[in-house]
Amino acid sequence: MRRQIKLTTRRELTAAISRRYQAADRNGKKLILDEFVKLTSYHRKHAIRLLTAQGCTHQGRQVGHRTYQEAVKEALIVLWEASDRICGKRLKSLLPSLIEAMERHGHLHLQDGVKEQLLAISAATIDRLLRPVREKASGGRKRKGARLSRVRKMVPVRTFADWEGVGPGFMEMDMVVHCGTKTVGTFVHSLVLTDVASGWTECLALPVREQALIVEAITGLRSRLPFPLLGLDTDNDSAFMNDTLWDYCQKQGIVLTRSRAYRKNDQAWVEQKNGAIVRKLIGYGRLEGLSETAALRRLYEASRLYINFFQPSFKLKSKTREGARVHKKYELPETPCRRLLQRDDVSPEIKEALKRQMQPLDPVLLLKSIREAQDMLMALSKDRTPETAAPDASTFVKSLATAWRTGEVRPTHRQEAKPGQRWRTRPDPFAAVWPALLGWLEERPDMEAKAMLKRLQASGFGEFPDGQLRTLQRRVRVRRKQIVQQLVYGAELQSTQSSTDDLL
């Protein structure tokens, strides 16, 4: 509990009630002690010691006799630098031989008593005296690593190898950001949950990264799952490691576990879906605002049935290591729905409900709704209207036979055409000598570019390495083409000179 009153006030309060506490009986002392602990936030044993102390005087911290003077510290700094700034424990063992060697060569002259103190100093005292020197030399005090939060200490760790034999209902949960290339500002997040046993995946769109929204999303999701939610496994993100989610899981009887820090393979099931589902549906563009969150939510509503009922996925069966090689065996690809139907630990009621839910589903219409939702999402993110009107079902079915001819069919992955480059990116190495080259071509129209380059290298006009032969060949070829056009069409050579430079 955080202390709510100042130190001076606590001291005055202790002095005021100490006599009353010492004169009271057993029940009175208990009441006074309870009130005193509540006000000061002291530990109960510490409060008893304060109230029963004679005189109850609180003096400030007294500085004792300083054993090591400034001369010892200055000599220690020199020895620390001479030892190449090693730690206190290593320097403690080196001091006798280092002092003797530096005195022998005349590098160190210690006063009376300083040498004895240096030889008697402990490693902890060396580190304490050198702490400000080390901080100054290293550019300032280093930031301490983040401590484990109270919730992270309570949540047990679950690794990839701890999922053997679990049934449906234990899901891994992760967050996918849609920030584009910059993480500044607020942007949309996707909350992804994957069942370890069956691969059943649910995606939820969140406008911001907030723990209360995560709890609300999980609450709404539980009614749509074909099985009861028994456990959640998350990473060490602060959006998951907090009192809000911890208290919710405790009240609802949900087992909350976490992966090891910086070990993504502990959450291999959901990490696979982040790429195979979320990035495949949406890509890596930036999404922000409530309108784009609503569009992403409609996309997930359209895709959840298509993914869980009509998208088979691989599932790792076993993994063995032989030396440096790892042999992996996978089960046959199955949809999450079929995996649930094949399990013996799934109740007949759940299986019957899945069959009834799958019966009216049309995979083509689901795919059509996914494409429309993707087109609407991209239209909102790029501030434009959808490209075309949504086709009817028959037109969409007919387009499946020829969709491959148009390239990318997902609107979220189409890239805008870039304008062609029509300008020179490097300076022309033959610009200064081009008039001379034109004279050579007039003298010998059949002269090859290789012969012209050798003549240039021997004439002393400058340095022209052999690697520039192709550039000269292109220029000569274009020039001869211009001459042919002049002879055939009577066109002026000057009019095509600018376009020639662009091509070169």
Image (cartoon, helix red, strand yellow):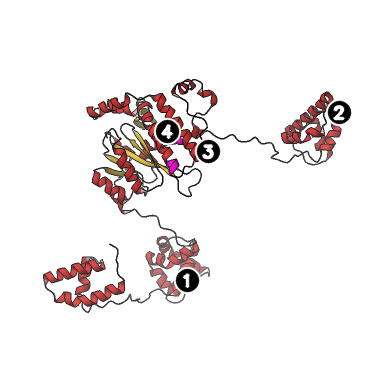
Q: 359 or 115: nearer the eye?
A: 359
Badge 2 or badge 4: first in the primary sequence: 4
* Mark pair 4, 1: CA separation: 63 Å
Q: Nearer the viewer, mark 1 or mark 2?
A: 2
Which of the pair 463/379 is nearer the observer? Answer: 379
Quarter containing the C terminus: top right
Q: Nearer the viewer, residue 501 or 350?
A: 350
Callout 2 amino acid = Arg
Q: Which mark is residue 74?
A: 1
Q: CA distance from mark 3 to mark 1?
A: 71 Å
Mark 4 lies on residue: 276
Query: Closer to the camera: disc 2 or disc 4?
Result: 4
Cα–Cα gap, marks 1 and 2: 85 Å
Q: Is residue 379 left or right of residue 439?
A: left
Task: Report the Cα–Cα distance between label 2 and label 4.
Answer: 64 Å
User: Which dot marks residue 135?
Assistant: none
Q: Nearer the viewer, mark 2 or mark 3?
A: 3
> Which residue is tagged 3?
384
Name the residue located 30 percent from the left edge and 42 percent from the top edge.
Answer: 219
Q: Residue 446: name its quadrant.
A: top right
